[in-house]
Amino acid sequence: MLYGADQGSDWHGDNIPPEELNVIERGKNYGWPFCYGDKQPDPYVNVGNIPGKITKAEYCAGTQGSVLNYTAHAAAIAMNYYTGTQFPAEYRNDAFIAFRGSWNRSEPSGYEIARVVFDAQNRPERIEPFITGFVYQDGDVWKQFGRVAGGGRRHVHGRQPAVHRRPERRHLPRAVHRGN
């Protein structure tokens, strides 16, 4: 499978749209900019450019929904699979996403590295914080200790996803990075 972690649109409030993990397949329509997440119509986008005379809800019903969602505006900028042996075995072949951090949210999100946990059948089951603490509250002010970024691999900014092919569990090749 080919997976992509992407960023949602800005200026939609604190909690929408979520950041997404998608299975990338040739010829699929992922709904942007009219839909987000699990085929949810975006209330802030004009429907004037939807092909045909259908509603936004009808259009979104025909799109490919996300596999998993994460906190809005966390800003995914890199994704890599762990194939090493330094961490415990349960981490092997899980993905790690670098979230740069929000700039337009009342309570910051991101500023962390999160782990995408895959089940025994190689399906992503959840995204959970892995390394955090790069943003903190000092009184009434949020401050950042740093912003994480991808290391050594190319990453894509904006709506285009950072795309990666998932390593097979029975054979442990190096993670393959496919991207622009």
Image (tube, rainbow, N blue to C red):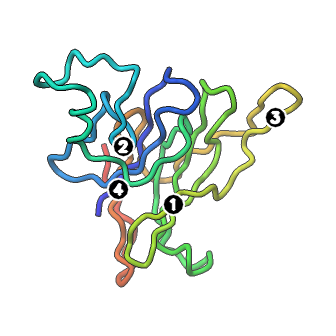
Q: Determine the secondary structure under disc 2.
A: loop
Which quarter shows the N terminus?
A: bottom left
Q: Please name whichever residue, 58 or 98, is drawn nearer the observer in this view of the structure.
A: 58
Residue located at (34% from left, 38% from top): 160
Q: Amino acid at mark 2?
A: Pro
Amino acid on which the number 3 mark rests in the picture: Gln
Report the disc number at residue 161: 2
Identify the mark nearer the N-term, 1 or 2.
Answer: 1
**Relative to the observer, which residue lies in front, 31 or 59?**
59
Callout 4: few (<14), some (14-19), or many (20+) C-alpha neighbours within 10 Å? Answer: many
Q: Is residue 66 above or below residue 105?
A: below
Q: CA distance from mark 3 to mark 1?
A: 27 Å
Left or right of residue 163, residue 72 in this image: right
Structural distance between the alpha carbons of marks 3 and 4: 33 Å
User: What is the three-letter code of the residue carrying label 4?
Assistant: Tyr
Q: Disc 1 marks which residue?
A: 126
| Label located before the other in sequence (4 or 1) | 4
Q: Nearer the viewer, mark 3 or mark 2?
A: 3
Circles 3 and 4: CB distance less than 8 Å? no
Residue furthest right as drawn: 139
In this rendered view, identify the residue nearer to me: 14 or 73: 14
Name the image quarter holding residue 38: top left
Callout 3: helix, strand or loop? strand
Disc number placed over residue 137 in the picture, else none: 3
The amino acid type found where label 1 is placed reads Arg
Give left or right: position of 27 versus 137.
left
- Dot 2: few (<14), some (14–19), or many (≥20) neighbours within 10 Å? many
Percent from the top left, x then y, of residue 134? 72, 43
Name the residue beneath numbered marker 4.
Answer: 3
Eye-nearest disc, 3 or 1: 1
Real-space Cα separation, disc 3 to disc 2, in angstroms: 30 Å
